[in-house]
Image (cartoon, helix red, strand yellow):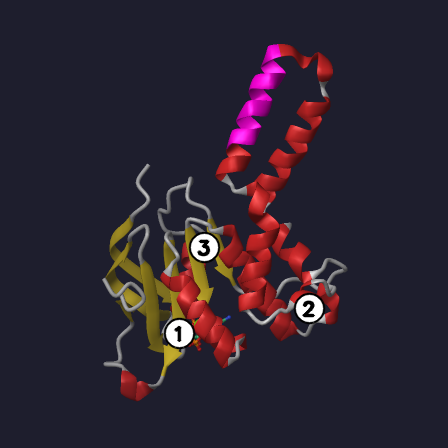
Amino acid sequence: MSRDIHIESLSVTFHGHDLIVDSELELNYGRRYGWLGLNGCGKSTLLTIISCRELPIPEHMDIYHLTREIEASDMSALEAVINCDEERMKLEKEAETLAADDGGGGETVERLDRSYERLDALDAATVEKRAAEILFGLGFDKKMQAKKSRDFSGGWRMRIALARGLFMKSAILLLDEPKNHLDLEACVWLEEMLKKFDRSLVAAAGIIAQETAGDVRIYDRYSRR
Ligand SMILES: Nc1ncnc2c1ncn2[C@@H]1O[C@H](COP(=O)(O)OP(=O)(O)OP(=O)(O)O)[C@@H](O)[C@H]1O
Ligand SMILES: [Mg+2]
């Protein structure tokens, strides 16, 4: 049940170009990685390879890959964040059905206990508060949190998608240029939030030529350990 990923020799070729040649990739659980490199060097491609599980990622590790904005719908920003949590919603429904089942006997009670235990583990009672805090940090005041997602621009719906990723706490969180749609205040908040992220995080960012030796490298910048 290891949650560390270690690939000794990784090569990626895309449309005839060698993007990554015979490189070592190590993603350790609980660490935060900044994936820096020149534009076009293959950062987004590598994140997609990870999220499509083309590398040997353990099945029990769920992945959230921030690629695009949430769809425009009648859901409010807050609902859009909360409703992404499929396991919790399924458990809540199941618990409701089990609680209504009077004649189920011991087995029903046992299953209900298990559902409640799991819901506790998922911190179900505080979902709304947690989702609201994340949205607030990303620039959504109370009024905006209640606004329909269809009334937001693509950039703001991208922020909602980012809020989802932070809320879900998947085992692996992949953020591709997360600062692109944020203003300075939200960027500062995001940095503080990511410092506390206790699963595996890879954040990709393009850099200009002078700042790099020319190679794609994985830095441990976000961990500072
Ligand atoms: N659909 C495509 N068809 C052909 N080539 C592509 C396609 N998508 C990406 N590429 C090429 O693959 C390479 C890697 O692209 P990728 O988007 O992964 O780089 P990146 O490091 O994320 O760049 P950026 O910093 O601009 O986001 C680039 O050379 C790009 O031109
Ligand atoms: Mg990219």
Q: CA distance from mark 2 to mark 1?
A: 28 Å
- Residue 164 or 72: which is nearer the viewer? 164
Disc on the earlier residue, 2 or 1:
2
Classify mark 1 as within 8 Å of ligand 1 or not, answering yes or no.
yes
Secondary structure, magenta segment, majority class: helix
Residue 96, image x and y in percent?
69, 30
Disc on the earlier residue, 1 or 3:
3
**Badge 2 amino acid:** Met
Q: CA distance from mark 3 to mark 2?
A: 31 Å
Residues in magenta? 106-117
**Direction from residue 111 to residue 100 in the image, left or right:** right
- Of tags 2 and 1, the one toward the viewer is 2
Q: Which mark is residue 192?
A: none
Disc on the earlier residue, 3 or 2:
3
Q: Quadrant of residue 8?
A: bottom left
Q: Which residue is mark 3?
A: 51
Q: Which residue is mark 2?
A: 144
Q: Which residue is mark 1?
A: 205
Classify mark 3 as within 8 Å of ligand 1 or not, answering yes or no.
no
Residue at x-position 46% and y-position 70%:
189
Neighbor class of circle 2 (other Cα within 10 Å; few <14, some 14-19, many 20+) is some
